[in-house]
Image (spheres, grey):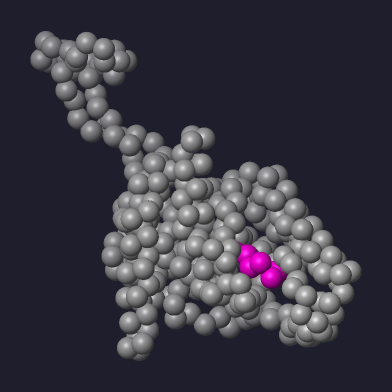
């Protein structure tokens, strides 16, 4: 049974995301993610300028007049959302009004409703160290509402992240061809190289789009003196002197190195990357990606 508060939150999320879908990029989604082929629609009489290769010779022979075949795009896609809700997604800094988890949930909701509005099949998995929830691709309003409920109510059992294991498992359960949105901060133990092989294998079956959720404080430390930091996934504590310029430079350099490794990984595996931040509205970043994707088609 859903609690009254959860039902209200589902409605609030649905209203917010529906406005974004309808007002900003329902069209961009449609043009950026075209169907995977064409299918026959009907025939009509030949007109000067039509491509003679489309003439339907059987109908032409029966009627004595030239007719051509008309085709329409085969629109239906299978879209899958893999959402990382490990403990690091709960990070919140002073610069961001919402946690990375909230950005991930709202991004997944917007993508789910966009796909549903275009009559695509949409599925979901929520993961941490493993896949903790799997919803097979489906269509319709009921499927969309279920995905929103799961995103809002799910409480992960594990705190850590194992992207490699998750991608390997998805490679075995997902349909042969589809589009996978992988939504995570990609702060994986072992760094980006730890899941390169599994990402490369999955990319042979799926078009993978990596959506990276970031926070400014993960890239740059403020000068606030002595602070205790805690790794939310391992529970490790560490004391940092943020007044030290050397410490701040080391922190920034480590973040830049991690980001560079991630960019190179996605480049090697031909994986599109979209970077979202807790410090700015995420919808415009998605719109820019959809528009860029359409231009290069």
- Residue 23: where, in percent of width, then height? 33, 55
Query: Furthest residue to the right?
Result: 246
Residue 241 sits above or below residue 59 on the image: below
Residue at left offset 65%, top offset 54%: 199
Which residue: 56% across, 80% down? Answer: 156
Say whether residue 214 is magenta.
yes
Magenta stretch: includes residue 23: no
Specify the quadrant of the image occupied by residue 141: bottom left
In what quadrant of the picture does the N terminus appear? Answer: bottom left
Q: Is residue 162 visible?
A: no
Using the image, determine if residue 84 lies above or below residue 232.
above
Res. 133 visible in picture: yes
Relative to the observer, which residue lies in front, 51 or 290?
Answer: 290
Instruction: Report the front residue among 41 and 225.
Output: 225
Specify start and end residues of the magenta stretch as a single range. 213-218
Q: Residue at x 37, y 84 (%)?
A: 6
User: Residue 268's spot in the image, x, y percent?
Assistant: 70, 44
| Depicted 126 relative to depicted 291: above or below | below
Judged left or right of residue 284, residue 52 is: left
Can you give x and y, in whole percent of width and height, for residue 63 in the image? 10, 15
Q: Position of residue 151 (x, y in %)?
A: 45, 74
Task: Determine whether, in the image, residue 145 is placed left or right of residue 253.
Answer: left
């Amino acid at each position: 049974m859903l609690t009254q508060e959860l039902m209200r939150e589902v409605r609030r999320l649905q209203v917010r995301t529906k406005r974004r879908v309808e007002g900003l990029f329902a069209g961009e989604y449609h043009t950026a993610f075209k169907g995977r082929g064409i299918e026959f629609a009907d025939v009509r009489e030949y007109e000067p300028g039509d491509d003679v290769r489309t003439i339907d010779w059987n109908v032409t022979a029966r009627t004595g007049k030239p007719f051509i075949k008309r085709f329409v795009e085969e629109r239906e896609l299978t879209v899958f959302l893999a959402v990382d809700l490990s403990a690091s997604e709960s990070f919140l800094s002073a610069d961001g009004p919402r946690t990375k988890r909230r950005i991930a949930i709202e991004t997944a909701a917007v993508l789910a409703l966009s796909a549903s509005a275009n009559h695509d099949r949409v599925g979901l998995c929520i993961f941490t160290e493993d896949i903790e929830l799997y919803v097979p691709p489906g269509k319709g309003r009921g499927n969309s509402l279920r995905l929103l409920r799961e995103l809002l109510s799910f409480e992960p059992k594990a705190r850590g992240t194992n992207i490699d294991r998750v991608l390997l498992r998805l490679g075995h359960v997902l349909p042969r061809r589809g589009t996978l949105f992988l939504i995570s901060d990609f702060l994986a133990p072992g760094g980006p190289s730890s899941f390169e092989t599994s990402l490369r294998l999955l990319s042979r079956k799926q078009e993978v789009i990596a959506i990276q959720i970031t926070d400014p404080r993960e890239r740059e430390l403020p000068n606030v003196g002595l602070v205790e930091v805690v790794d939310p996934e391992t529970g490790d504590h560490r004391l940092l002197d943020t007044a030290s310029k050397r410490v701040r430079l080391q922190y920034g350099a480590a973040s830049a190195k991690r980001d560079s490794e991630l960019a190179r990984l996605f480049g090697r595996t031909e994986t599109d990357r979209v970077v979202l931040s807790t410090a700015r509205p995420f919808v415009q970043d998605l719109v820019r990606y959809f528009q860029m994707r359409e231009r290069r088609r």
